[in-house]
Image (cartoon, rainbow, N blue to C red):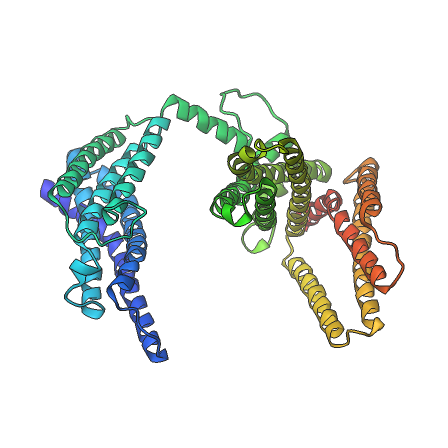
Amino acid sequence: MMSSAMIATTKSFCKRAWPGASIGVATLVIVPLMIKILMHLQGYRIPYNDQEIFSLHFTYLGISWVIFLSITVRALAGSQKYCRGLPISSRAIATWLMLAMVGLVVVLQLATNGAYRALFFDERWLADYWPVLGPLLFLVTLVLTGHAIFWTLNAPSYTRIILSMGIIVALFWWFLSRYFPQGFKAEAVPWSHVTLGEFVLMQLVSLAAWYQGTRAFASVRSGTALPSPQWTQTRNWWDSLTTGVSSSGQTGLISHREALSRLHWRDSCQRAVIMGGGLFGIAVLVLNTTMRNANGSHPINITEGFMQIYLMFSIIAALVVGLVAGEGTCGPGRTEMKSFLAVTPLSDRDFAVAMFGNLVKTVLYASLLIQSGLMLNMLVFVAPGMLQGDQASIISSRVALYWFVYSVYTLTCFWTIAANVISVLWTGRSWFYYLVIGSILGCFGLFVFILNSTDRISYSPNNLYCQMAFFLVLAFLIFAGVVTAFVTACQKGFIKLSTAGIASGLWLIGSLAAVWLKFPAPTGLQEMLTLSLYIFFLSLFALAFAPFATIPLALSWNRHR
């Protein structure tokens, strides 16, 4: 019985693993071979001395490990449900799965390295520049440790997560130290010989990982693996934050609008916050950390560099949030609005209020997540420098003012881009999407054409008039579109007249402030062109208020098609 079960387990695992394994090995062999052939045909020197080949060793290890471990994890995820139902002990199943994963990665590594020896390397490869035994034994240890962590974290807790991360970091630190026997500041050397102590240590870690992996698998299989209370509380808090649903167990009645808001948030807005806010917040944190030295050592210079990266990623994130949240109202093919939205028993006005509230929450949460990445950088790399020196108070006030102005400006851009993209997508009409995209591209093409004409005839005032006419006409069209949207929304009863008045007042206050601070006096042609450009920017500022009218109109248009 046990032998037949093991054979069935192996077949299930290998059936899922061999297509990806074949593609992975072929990729790792064919791509370098093609590069070698192309370099030879182009007459370039092939980097074939020992040091140059050894410098590619870590690149190969990183790529191959990612490919092979991904293949084995995918095969494990596909076969674990089948394996749990086998009529044999949990220790036997877990052990056999571990052996299958280890055997697969060993075979793949040996096949790839054998192909490299036949195609690229000479007989000195193992000793001089391409170690195999040490990395292969470490990979076996890493697979077994990862297997243990995989089953252990099926019952997550903060202690297990922190301990698992510490184990992984320690393993990789130890592995890299094999290549730097004289310290990490010295040059790397191949790990050509595995000492007895290194071999015994890896075997002890593998044995401990096997023991923990079998215990954790048995707990998961028997259903006794449960998350810690602290982890459960954190998960409930996160679910409440992202979905708007409380897990307190209360079953009070809620309104139709509240129910619609929660369901729509879970359907599309939550994903937009995670993708546009969480991922880009991490990107801001990582990129600012890695590039902090390029901005200089002064706190103001570091802040400027951080803010530029923050602004760039915020604009990209706004597009992502707009696209993800905007596509959440229609089904596949955009033939109709999703049924749970279309048939909700609410008037168009209440329907738009619920959806608009989710839009505001989505933009706010996503922008705060990105801002949190920036704030971590500021606290770690800027705050210590602000407290040093004789001019600490002046530097602190300048940094704080710079951060505040940039953050408000970035949040305004984030809202304007995301909200207007969503208002276009919530119409549900593909032809309208293409019309808007085509109009933007057409205006950009016309602007490039005018600039090229200006470069060719740089002294003709007619070209300046063309640029002024371009910006003024575009500003007029934007103003006309925004005003028309507000008038139509008020006439249909989607928004109150007071809403339009407040939006107009806020735009007017911002415009007057811009006029007072920046507007040039129209004394010449160049100043007139600058004035036209500022008027165009004021029309873009009006787009920040346009979603208050365009969102209800888009939803009504989509809902009643």
Which x, y percent locates residue 188? 27, 52
Which x, y percent locates residue 44? 35, 76
Who's the residue at 71% across and 40% down the image? 348
| Residue 341 placement: quadrant | top right
Placement of 220 over or under 413, stated as above or below:
above
Which x, y percent locates residue 107? 18, 55
- Residue 303 appears in view: yes
In the rendered structure, the answer to whether residue 255 lies left or right of residue 85 reads right
Placement of 178 over or under 399, stated as above or below:
below
Which x, y percent locates residue 285? 50, 42
In the rendered structure, the answer to whether residue 270 lies left or right of residue 231 reads right
Q: Nearer the viewer, residue 446 or 290?
A: 290
Placement of 100 over or under 235, stated as above or below:
below
| Residue 99 placement: quadrant | top left
Q: Nearer the viewer, residue 69 or 362?
A: 69
Q: Nearer the viewer, residue 330 or 515?
A: 515
Q: Nearer the viewer, residue 301 or 376?
A: 301
Who's the residue at 31% across and 53% down the image? 62
| Residue 162 placement: quadrant | top left
- Residue 477 appears in view: no
Toward the right, the furthest residue is 523
Who's the residue at 30% across and 44% down the image? 77
Placement of 380 over or under 135, stated as above or below:
above
In the rendered structure, the answer to whether residue 178 lies left or right of residue 384 reads left
Who's the residue at 56% across and 34% down the image? 383
| Quadrant (top left/top right/bottom left/bottom right) for the N terminus | top left
